Image: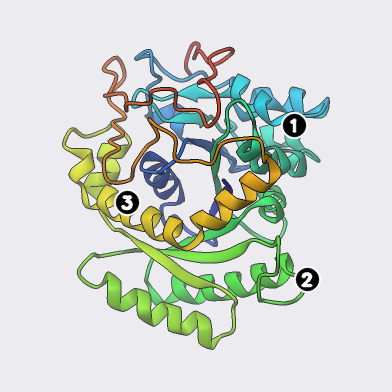
Amino acid sequence: MALIALAADKGSPGVSTAAVALAAVWPRRVLLAETDPAGGDLVYRSAAAHGGPLNPNTGMLSIAATARRGLVPDQLWDHVQPLSGGLEVLVGLGNSEQAAGLAGLWPTLGHAFASLADSPHAAADVIADCGRISGDTPAAELFPHASLVLLVSRTEPEALARVRDRAAALAGKLNGGSRVAGPGSPMVGVVLIADTGSAAKLASQVNDMLVHAQTGARVVGTLADDPAGAEQLAGRRRGRLDKSLLIRTARKVTADLYQQYGAAWSASAHAAQPHQPQPQQQGQYAPSSQQYQPGQPGQPGQQPAQQGSAQGGGRPSDGRAAGAGR
């Protein structure tokens, strides 16, 4: 399994929505981590599993003290809260000032996120919402530990120019000056937010641009520019979320990613823990059937069937109850 980091170069292309959408249909157990140093949004817009608000003090803020004494990957679960739809989240910081408490700890977090895949008790992939990145953002210190860094972009010319330049710079930094991902280095991919009618054509054109510019990155998929679906995902609008264009395209992206990289990720986890069974145990999510319903505060959504959702172990519960919201 793997750490997947999502980020954007500039503006508001929808990194948080993309991260939640991909996590909602991820085919294996997954932890969604809000790692944007500027602060997270889930505590404001999503209900906890008990129907009340999420606890803003349980998540990235509470993990800071633990990480300074060393961080065992399974300790991450002590800071996780389940949303009303069943998605397990590490709630982000409240504001950028709180990021000072994580100074120097980002590599420790990155290692813990990546190593959670090899936990013999509660293994999971981690999708990290890193928000906007720049040359000095501390969240970039997670990237060397990732299997995949996904840059989210809209399709306006200026946005595509920025993502091209950012992809080239990032690939070079992560690969010691080379833009070709070597063994153990993360691949840089681009996810486009686009109208479904033109998505395939745009993806091909942007991919050609990335290749021609020798960025070392490529387009890995497109998510629908679907404001109604995004509102449903955030719990602000009712409807069949699983039928929305946003979730349907998110399923396509995750299926393509696993077709391309899933075997390598599974093999890596198996090599690290040879005594553990291979993934794909009974009760795991399938992209074609999982339905994440965030619900409204006080109206929990439908819980996905999980039948012991942890890889190689039971679902952790200690320290995961949400408290009073913000």
Q: Which of marks 2 and 1 is in front?
A: 2
Q: Quadrant of residue 299?
A: top left
Q: Is residue 40 visible?
A: no
Indicate left or right for 181 with 52 as reference: right
Look at the picture and state if 138 lies above or below 33: below
Look at the picture and state if 258 lies above or below 276: below
Q: How far apart are marks 1 and 3 (CA)?
A: 36 Å
Indicate left or right for 226 with 165 as reference: left
Q: Position of residue 205 (x, y in %)?
A: 37, 82
Q: What element carries label 1?
A: helix
Residue 101: give its label. Answer: 1
Question: Between residues 93 and 26, which one lies in front from this camera angle?
Answer: 26
Mark 2, other Cα within 10 Å: few <14 / some 14–19 / many ≥20: few
What residue did someone put label 2 on? 176
Q: Residue at x 71, y 60 (%)?
A: 184
What residue did someone put label 3 on? 251
